[in-house]
Image: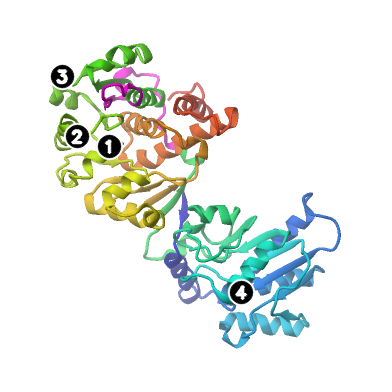
Amino acid sequence: MEILVDSRQMKLCDRNTIECFGVPSLVLMERAALSVADEIEGYFQGGDCLKGEKSVLVVCGLGNNGGDGAAAGRILWQKGYAVTIVMPPDLEKASLETKRQIDILRNYGIGILHEIPEGEFQVVVDALFGIGLARDLEGAYKGYVAAMNEKEGWKVAVDIPSGIHADTGMVMGAGFRADITVTFGFPKSGLVLYPGAAYAGKVSVKDIGIDKYSFMEEKPHMYLVGRGDLAEVPRRRQDSNKGTYGKVLVVAGHKNMAGAAFLSAKASYRTGAGLVQVLTEESNRVILQQLLPEAILAAYEGSDLPRLLKWASAITIGPGLGTGEREAFLTESVLKMANVPVILDADGLNILAGHLEWLREAKAPVIITPHLGEMARLVKMPIPELKGQLLQAARSFAREYNVICVLKDARTVTALPNKNVYINTTGNNGMATAGSGDVLTGILAGLIAQGMEPQQAAPIGVCLHGAAGDRQAQQIGSHSLMAQDIIEGIPGVLNSLFGFDTL
């Protein structure tokens, strides 16, 4: 998993590198500038670049991000590129390091403009604001961003696109739309979360001398999860039987709502669970037996819930469950009686919204998997406000109620009670379809049943879910993707990892 930082942690690492390890800030700035210049040179040397004069527009702010851009422009100018540098007129307000870069430009005879000129450039570099921006862009700076966006050249952002909040990815008044963002040390959460991810384009992380040692006493607490992390999925053993891979109990399905139970149960089987039992409405029995004959079936009426809870290695409750008195009783009973991990989703979450105290009485680990609407009900926050606080909301809820919170969005956030947060990078917009969440609960239960700890299974399960969706979207397209397609993508992903291979 790749370390991810917010603006506070990045500033801490920067300060520690300078003050504690003694690396001069101008050295860091020069290395950052070299990495930006190298990326632009690579573009000019590639096949996508238009022929003709190699022109570069660099628009710099007065902070250190502007210094990075000014130094990059100077490096390119020294190599013979046609470089135009634009900075605000009040240069006396520049940071100390940026003033040094301005002096170096003057020593070389490189002019500085204060307005963005007419005409086109092959490359447009945004070095107006870095990760420290905390308020909406306005006035001349907003005008700079608008003018850069109107240019037709290849767009490069230095560290983060100007106007994008480094922590949340939200657009502050206006945002620079980059084709590539060259960022330093670690990726920032605002480059991964939407809408920031759409503004950042491709993200290229460059080593400038700020690394894991720069955290010093403080530990990283955010991580990116990608396809490479799926190697953590449990492997099969030669000497095994169905009991080796655990038992999943799926409590799901109201009358005429058998589909959700089917999707969750089948996803558990596809992920590798040894046995799956569905506790559901009696009227669902025939259709589920036809759809998934491998599953054991039990009806709500007359079932021995304590025995079923003891039987299970992992429990899913909520998909298509309904929200009546019986369903509320089942949800409360499962949370308070289960001694194995519980994944709570869909109607289970809708019931929970009025009874959050049940979480405090849970004996076993609980994973909740809300989408934005469900999370908004849990935390009593409007969805637009929640959208701008994904990390904070998930982390706060996880810590307050001692649960694992999997907050589903274009970038799903998994928050643990210990403050650690994982942001998933797999998945696609075709997965915004009915039943996709039911598949995720089944994957999570299947991994836990096979022995993964819930805090590991949650981010890895989200990643597997997204990877399966990506695999299928490549074959049938994102418009046509359905929940069952995601399930059918799981075997291909797992086979690509392990093949027909066992321990």
Q: CA distance from mark 2 to mark 3?
A: 15 Å
Q: Is residue 259 above or below residue 90?
A: above
| Residue nearest the observer in this picture, 258 or 501 | 258
Q: Amino acid at mark 2?
A: Thr
- How is the protein colored in the picture? rainbow
Q: CA distance from mark 1 to mark 2?
A: 9 Å
Question: Which residue corresponds to mark 4?
Answer: 66
> Residue 247 falls in which quadrant of the image?
top left
SS for dot 1:
strand
Q: Residue at x 57, y 84 (%)?
A: 96
Q: CA distance from mark 3 to mark 4?
A: 68 Å
Q: CA distance from mark 2 to mark 4?
A: 55 Å
Q: Earlier in the sequence, mark 2 or mark 4?
A: 4
Pointers 3 and 4 in contact (C-beta within 8 Å): no
Q: Earlier in the sequence, mark 1 or mark 2?
A: 2
Q: Which residues are magenta?
A: 232-260
Residue 288 screen position, x and y as percent: 32, 16
Question: Which residue corresponds to mark 3?
Answer: 301
319 on left or right of 1 = left
SS for dot 3:
loop
Q: Residues within 10 Å of mark 1 (few under 14, many from 20)?
A: many
Question: Which residue corresponds to mark 1?
Answer: 344
Question: Which residue corresponds to mark 2?
Answer: 331
Residue 291 screen position, x and y as percent: 37, 15
Residue 435 screen position, x and y as percent: 40, 30
Q: CA distance from mark 1 to mark 4?
A: 48 Å
